[in-house]
Amino acid sequence: MSGGMAAAAILIAGACTFLLRALPSLIFGSGRKMPPFFSYLGRALTPAIMAVLLVYCMKDSFSNGWAALLPQLIGVAVVAALHLWKHSALLSIALGTVVYMLLISRVF
Amino acid sequence: MVAAPKVSRRTWRYALILTLPTMFSYIFVGIAYGVVLQQAGYGWPWALFSSAVIVSGAFQFVLVPMLTAGTTLLTVAVTALFVGCRLLFYGLATVDSFRKLPRLRPLLIHGLTDESFALFTTMNPGPGVDRQQVMCIVTFGNVLYWIFGSLLGGLIGQALPVDLAGVEFCMTALFTTIVLDQWRRRPDRLPVAVGMALALLFLLLLGPEAFLLPALAGAALCLSLGRRVLAKRLAEGERE
């Protein structure tokens, strides 16, 4: 992407994100509640979207064969095991990333 | 703090101690983001710019491969709206507090993140501590930590002579921890499963370039149709 397009993408993403943050106070104001359908959807959709994004992170390795997919899956397993064991997101992310980097440079 | 009333030392102290955990995590994840962005060909000015304009870690990580792949602006916008839909709540819950500071309000709204909101809902300020002022300091502090971390990451990525191939995995790792945390909350399991299944299905059907929007839209549709069942479960889960 050219610099101009990248800047446009960042500005548009920023505008959309700001809109979501500002919208409730602009429309619903103080004291009033969001319509139940929206509050339900915002609540229920978030975990589903995070799962979609996890797949999005790994999207390219699915089409690039086992040599690309296997280190990703091992990395995810390491992160998950650490996270279940120590409950520290920072530790799981840091160690998992180091393991993945070692795997792709030394093993695969 | 331009038009803001004087902030007592006790308030400063309370607010800054409150942000210590987010200081660590924002600077750490910010550095990771800055490094990933730099490795993708967008150096520290881009890290600074995007972190100041978007202020949303999860989405900014997703945006990096979109920038390198030249994804259309429409896809970027729709994805930003989907990923940010949870922010609707934070805005609503802070309306009254932010209203008291009209001049700073747009900035406070702009800087409202998951972590700031979590701190608001769990904080318990004692006597002599101004709640509204604490919320402002927490919001601005967190934004500054995030921007600072991103900038640092961009500079580190540029300065480090070692090969950083694979560093982008920290984004996969971040989402792995987020999804795991959600899986541990029982009522969230069904949405997680729906999202995962649809993403894999559309990835197989449409390939890596085209699956994201159908998967997001499909998840929204499925969860809308399943509202009767799921709304009850979520409400029960919240009470526990």
Image: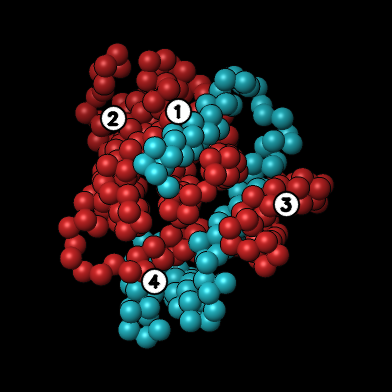
Chain colours: A cyan, B red
Identify which amino acid the numbered label 1 is placed on: Ile
- Which of discs 3 and 4 lies nearer the camera? The answer is 3
Can you say whether B124 is above or below A45 in the image?
A: above
Q: CA distance from mark 4 to mark 2?
A: 38 Å
Give the secondary structure at mark 4: helix
Q: Label for residue B218?
A: 3
The tag earlier along the polypeptide, 3 or 2, is: 2
- Which of discs 1 and 2 lies nearer the camera? The answer is 1
Quadrant where the N terminus of chain B is found in the figure = top left
Give the secondary structure at mark 3: helix
Give the labeled residue for mark 2.
Answer: B11
Q: Are the numbered discs 3 and 2 placed on the same chain, yes or no? A: yes
Q: Chain of mark 3?
A: B
Give the labeled residue for mark 4.
Answer: A96
On the image, the x and y values in percent for residue A80 come to: 48, 71
The tag earlier along the polypeptide, 1 or 2, is: 2
Say which residue appears at 53% left-offset and 74% top-offset: A64
Say which residue appears at 34% left-offset and 74% top-offset: A101
Say which residue appears at 74% left-offset and 36% top-offset: A37
Q: Are the numbered discs 3 and 4 placed on the same chain, yes or no? A: no
